[in-house]
Image (spheres, rainbow, N blue to C red):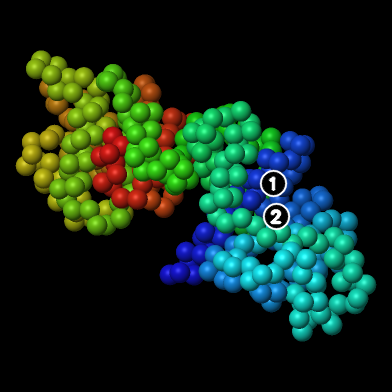
Amino acid sequence: MDGGYYAIKGFEYQIDKNILEILKESDINKAINIEQNQDIDSIDFVMQVKYKEATKFTPSTIKEPVIQLIEEHIKNNSKQYILYCYFKDFNGYTESISIDSILGSSKTNYTQQQKTDFEKSFKLNFAPQYDIQLEQTIREIQNLNYNEDESIIYHSRASNFLRNLVVDNSPNQISNRTCTKKDLIELFKNDRKVIFENSFRFFKGEDSYFKKMKKDFFTSNNVDKAIKIFIIELDGSENTSDIVLLLKTISEKYFKQLTRDIKGEAPFFFFRNIDPQKTIDVKEQLVEAKLLFKDGYDFLNSKFNLTSITSKSSKENRISIKLINSETELNQVINYNFNTLKEVYQFFKSKPIVINLDIKETNIEIQNSNELLKII
């Protein structure tokens, strides 16, 4: 468990260092490579990034990455070779440790000339801890003339973009794991899929996080005909009543039943990781509460009917909730032509579902479904 925690945190630390290196470049077209030959490299440097939050530093703890850098230097001695590392305690050591001290028993594997030449190109950097580097990364984005809140949002977007560069490109496609400063600038300018992740919560605190989400996305008093699709990732601990309350609260915000008419459209809901029996229980409670809904299944053993679930709410049918049962059905609904604006709101714990469509999309990280009520 702890090993996985530190591994993930180490990768996030590396991602932030990537962002820093990219944004510090004066040449906006200079390519920075991510997880290719080493953690980070370019035409003039190669860098290993190590984040050891639970480890005290000794020369032997960096032996393996230094050997990797020496081997790279032997192949190409025209670059600078950097080990960027954080440890729980540096044990009184400084960045001027000799190569022989680091290599230990492996020092005889290389000639004195190889070691001397490497030392001229090698730089050991004792790095700041996770939260300090995160702050540095946010400030670097602010240097592009964004305010702090915008910079925190764009940090999330840049992090997600770089993660996907690695995840979406297998080892035989590592040449695609490349990013320039221009790429990030264009991402910030053009991306419509706003993602709020824990960096914002870290900087602003939970109350400010919830207030900003509410203010930016959910405070409008205007009820319009836009189709709103909510994708909510559950963790399995929610009871049926919690889910029904969530449905009722969000529905009442966007669908108003007046004395003689209605305002707005029934929002769509797709719950990720929900138990099939709990889905049935939720529908039963909705029926008991006289909350009318559509789920695309109009009779026993029927097939999914896209026309049924996408039919408009009216003063006659008073449909206030629409439930989507699977990701396949979700894709059909998202791709359906409603002849009006569609908006997708994803509340995620792990990562958002990728939607390959030019659509207004807002993705907000939550720790549990109860946080939705504070945001909505």
Marks 2/1 in contact by CB < 8 Å: the verdict is: yes
* Quadrant where the C terminus is found in the figure: top left
Of mark 2 and mark 1, the one earlier in the sequence is 1
Q: Is residue 94 left or right of residue 212?
A: right
Q: Which residue: 56% across, 60% down? A: 10
Mark 2 and mark 1: Cα distance apart in space? 9 Å
User: Residue extending furthest right?
Assistant: 113
Q: Is residue 157 left or right of residue 346?
A: right
Q: Position of residue 7 (x, y in %)?
A: 53, 64
**Vertical placement of residue 177 versus 292, above or below:** below
Number of marks present in the image shown: 2
Q: Is residue 351 left or right of residue 39?
A: left
Q: Kindly indicate the quadrant of the structure image that contains residue 235.
A: bottom left
The residue type indicated by label 2 comes to Ile
Q: Kindly indicate the quadrant of the structure image that contains residue 89.
A: bottom right
Q: Which residue: 56% across, 66% down? A: 88
Q: Position of residue 43 (x, y in %)?
A: 81, 50
Residue at the disc numbered 2 = 40
Residue 258 seen in render: yes
The residue type indicated by label 1 comes to Glu
Residue 76 seen in render: no
User: Residue extending furthest top?
Assistant: 260
Q: Which residue: 37% across, 21% down? A: 339
* Quadrant where the N terminus is found in the figure: bottom left
Label 1: element kind: helix
Label 2: element kind: strand
Q: Kindly indicate the quadrant of the structure image that contains residue 363.
A: top left
**Vertical placement of residue 90 versus 328, above or below:** below
121 or 243: nearer the viewer: 121
Name the mark on residue 21: 1
